[in-house]
C-alpha cells in the first residue's frame, strides 16, 4: 500500500530532517566525516596504498585520491570514490593517484613528471590509457 501523494510524503521527511539538523548541527559533520574516512580507508585497502603513476612513490594517505582511469567524460557520474564503491571497487576503472599526478593527468592526459618518454602515453599502464579514448589523435 503506497501513499496517495508521494511528493507530499517526501516533503514531510525532508522538512523533518532539516529541522533535526538545524537543531542538532553537531551530529551531521562528524557522522559524514567518519563515513568519508571509512570509505577512503576501504578504497586504499582495495585499490592500493600508493600512487599508481609509474615512478611516483607517494603513499601518504592525505595526498592520495581515487581516480576514474578513463575520466568522467567516459561514464563517471559522481565523485570517483562513490563510483568506485558502486562498481565493487573495479580496478580496471579506478586507481589511486596522488593529487599532483591526478591533476596533471586530468589536464594533459598523462603525467609528464613520472612518464619521461612521451611515447609512454599510449603504453599499458592505466594512468596513460586514456589518451586515445578521450581525445582523437591529431592525425584524424
Image: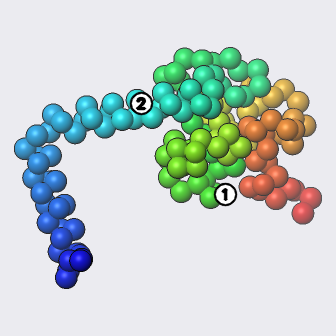
Instruction: Give me the residue at 18% from left, 36% from top.
Output: 27
Instruction: Give me the residue at 81% from left, 28% from top.
Output: 115
Please tell me how crowded label 1 is: few (under 14), some (14-19), or many (20+) other residues with Cα within 10 Å: few
The location of residue 93, given as percent across then percent down, is 67, 46
Q: Is residue 124 visible to the viewer in this orientation of the structure?
A: yes
Q: Residue furthest bottom?
A: 4
Instruction: Compute the Cα span from label 2 to label 1.
Output: 27 Å
Residue closer to the observer: 103 or 1: 1
Residue closer to the observer: 101 or 5: 5
Q: Is residue 69 visible to the viewer in this orientation of the structure?
A: no
Instruction: Determine which residue is flagged by label 2.
Output: 38
Instruction: Determine which residue is flagged by label 1.
Output: 74
The location of residue 18, given as percent across then percent down, is 15, 54
Q: Is residue 68 left or right of residue 1?
A: right
Q: Is residue 119 left or right of residue 62?
A: right
For mark 2, give the secondary structure: helix
Q: Nearer the viewer, mark 2 or mark 1?
A: 2
Instruction: Give me the residue at 87% from left, 42% from top.
Output: 122
Q: Relative to 40, is 137 above or below? A: below
The location of residue 70, given as percent across then percent down, is 69, 49
Amino acid at each position: 500500500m503506497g501513499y496517495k501523494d508521494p511528493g507530499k510524503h517526501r516533503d514531510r521527511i525532508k522538512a523533518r530532517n532539516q529541522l533535526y539538523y538545524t537543531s542538532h548541527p553537531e551530529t551531521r559533520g562528524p557522522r559524514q566525516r567518519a563515513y568519508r574516512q571509512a570509505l577512503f580507508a576501504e578504497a586504499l585497502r582495495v585499490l592500493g596504498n600508493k600512487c599508481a603513476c609509474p615512478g611516483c612513490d607517494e603513499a601518504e594517505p592525505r595526498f592520495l585520491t581515487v581516480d576514474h582511469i578513463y575520466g568522467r567524460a567516459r561514464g563517471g557520474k559522481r565523485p570517483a570514490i562513490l563510483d568506485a564503491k558502486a562498481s565493487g571497487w573495479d580496478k580496471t576503472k579506478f586507481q589511486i593517484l596522488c593529487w599532483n599526478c591526478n591533476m596533471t593527468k586530468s589536464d594533459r592526459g598523462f603525467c609528464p613528471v613520472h612518464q619521461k618518454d612521451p611515447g609512454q602515453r599510449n603504453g599499458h599502464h592505466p594512468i596513460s590509457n586514456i589518451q586515445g579514448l578521450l581525445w582523437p589523435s591529431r592525425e584524424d
